[in-house]
């Protein structure tokens, strides 16, 4: 049992992991391939070369167990890494639970979230390849902030399309992106054919990550000196995030603690996979046996209510086809405050692991999540971003079950970012104006069927 007085578990810079972990090496059953929409065949490196540098393309399809982190990336990581692991003593006391709750805190990064863990290597590899500019999408603005920061480290331009709902709700994220040197447009915009198409159909569109991706990809594909960067979903993105889980394993080993339950929020899947994948490696090797639980918003329930099928990663259909849990590439979610969890699909890797039974999933409404966030802020002193409040809600639910049963379960959750720039969302909750959105299964399934009917027949 861990030292009951220890609150913060730290690693020194010398103890920081120097390799990313590739779950593809150990997953019991390989996931389905990504397909070219024109041929229906698995995509090759040449199919992706107009958007990504070869180093990232090779990481996307790599099968070796570990990938060395370049020294230039480690040097930037050390601005905030290793990140702390905390024991939530005060939250435990408030709940009256015998459970021991730990949280891995990624809000110490320059962007205030886990996103720089992949933004920095993506910017590095693009600069190494001679690229001058990166385009991207962002929801709540955490990814756009992270990429703007990363581009500043390697003298790259950064152009960001931010989902209109979040652009309007979170003006300080736009200002932060601009402070780091990025340019921000609300999406859908009139700057791209994709944006103009959406606006012609719905002039008041609140946008979606799928639409913003279409705009960013369109611009990148037209300029050989410009590439596209994605903040979640793809294999190489989740690979970079595994430094979170590798650090957490080392920190828990320091205090002799073993986890019974891992909980993380899921939108595209990078934060969740980054923490969970190294623990799954240990589970498959028989060294520990934690339950792994994904938590998503009831307003955008890709795992719990979506369909496992091939679909586009963007709204217009510019990306390859990925087999994933999807709500349909034309799905436009309600404008909930957890903008980072409003993506229509789930990472193919996480979708595959869910289908194979290696993790479970639940969905939570906004009001329950913000209640958890407020309790966490008042006990632990950190205002969480709206996204990780979903994981906190499920963590608290499990801790209360332990209170009823008397079980001393060890819970580890991912606190993937702070909410200092999300205070209007807390204002909405505290004033009683938060609205819980949900979907009937039949409505979602009909919408997905309609979206998938338009896919290439080769699939």
Image (cartoon, rainbow, N blue to C red):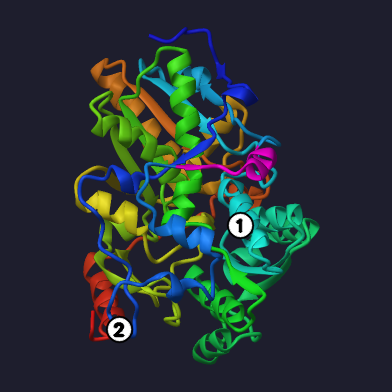
Q: For mark 2, what is the residue? A: 39
Q: Which of disc 2 and disc 1 is earlier in sequence?
A: 2
Where residue 403 sits: x, y (%)? 31, 19
Q: Nearer the viewer, residue 310 or 140?
A: 310
| Quarter-of-image position of residue 430 | top right
The structure residue drawn at horizontal position 31% and vertical position 45%, both measured from the top left corner, is 25
Where residue 287 sits: x, y (%)? 27, 23
In this rendering, the answer to whether 228 lies above or below 118 is: below
Q: Residue furthest bottom?
A: 200
Q: Can you say which quadrant of the picture contains the C terminus? A: bottom left
Residue 72: in magenta span: yes
Q: Nearer the viewer, residue 458 or 192?
A: 458
The structure residue drawn at horizontal position 54% and vertical position 85%, both measured from the top left corner, is 194
Q: Secondary structure at mark 2?
A: loop
Where residue 65 sits: x, y (%)? 37, 42
Residue 387: in magenta span: no
Q: For mark 1, what is the residue? A: 125
Q: Secondary structure at mark 1?
A: helix
Give the crowd class for mark 1: few <14, some 14-19, many >=20 residues within 10 Å.
some
Q: Nearer the viewer, residue 135 or 208?
A: 135
The answer, for residue 163, to whether it is visible in the render is: no
How far apart marks 1 and 2 lie (CA) works out to 29 Å
């Amino acid at each position: 049992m861990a030292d009951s007085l220890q609150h913060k578990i730290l690693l020194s810079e010398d103890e920081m992991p120097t390799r990313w972990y590739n779950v593809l090496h150990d997953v019991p059953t390989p996931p389905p391939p990504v397909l070219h929409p024109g041929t229906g065949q698995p995509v090759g490196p040449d199919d992706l070369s107009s958007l990504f540098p070869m180093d990232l393309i090779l990481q996307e399809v790599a099968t070796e167990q570990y990938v060395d982190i370049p020294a230039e990336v480690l040097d930037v990581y050390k601005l905030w890494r290793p990140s702390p692991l905390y024991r939530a003593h005060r939250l435990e006391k408030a709940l009256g639970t015998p459970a021991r709750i730990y949280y891995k805190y990624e809000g110490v990064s320059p962007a205030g979230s886990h996103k720089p863990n992949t933004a920095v290597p993506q910017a590095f590899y693009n600069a190494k390849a001679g690229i001058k500019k990166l385009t991207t999408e962002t929801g709540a603005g955490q990814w756009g902030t992270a990429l703007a920061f990363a581009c500043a480290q390697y003298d790259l331009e950064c152009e960001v399309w931010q989902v209109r709902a979040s652009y309007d709700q979170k003006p300080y994220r736009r200002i932060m992106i601009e402070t780091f040197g990025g340019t921000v447009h609300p999406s859908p915009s009139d700057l791209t054919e994709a944006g103009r198409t959406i606006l012609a159909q719905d002039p008041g569109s609140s946008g979606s990550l799928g639409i913003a991706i279409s705009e960013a990809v369109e611009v990148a594909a037209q300029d050989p000196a410009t590439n596209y960067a994605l903040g979640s979903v793809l294999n190489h993105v989740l690979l970079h995030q595994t430094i979170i889980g590798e650090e957490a394993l080392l920190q828990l080993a320091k205090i002799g603690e073993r986890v019974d339950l891992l909980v993380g929020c899921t939108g595209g899947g990078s934060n969740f996979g980054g923490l969970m994948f190294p623990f799954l490696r240990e589970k498959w090797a028989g060294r520990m046996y934690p339950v792994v639980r994904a938590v998503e918003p009831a307003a955008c329930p890709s795992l719990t209510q979506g369909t496992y099928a091939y679909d586009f990663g963007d709204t217009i259909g510019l990306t390859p086809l990925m087999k994933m849990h999807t709500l349909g590439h034309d799905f436009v979610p309600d404008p909930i405050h957890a903008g980072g969890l409003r993506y229509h699909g789930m990472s193919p890797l996480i979708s595959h692991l869910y289908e194979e039974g290696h993790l479970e999933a639940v969905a939570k409404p906004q009001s329950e999540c913000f209640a958890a966030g407020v309790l966490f802020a008042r006990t632990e002193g950190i205002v969480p971003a709206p996204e990780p409040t979903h994981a906190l809600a499920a963590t608290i639910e499990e801790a209360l079950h332990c209170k009823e049963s008397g079980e001393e379960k060890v819970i580890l959750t991912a606190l993937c970012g702070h909410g200092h720039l999300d205070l209007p969302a807390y204002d909405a909750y505290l004033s009683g104006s938060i609205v819980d959105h949900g979907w009937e299964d039949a409505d979602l399934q009909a919408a997905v069927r309609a979206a998938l009917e338009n896919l290439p027949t080769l699939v």
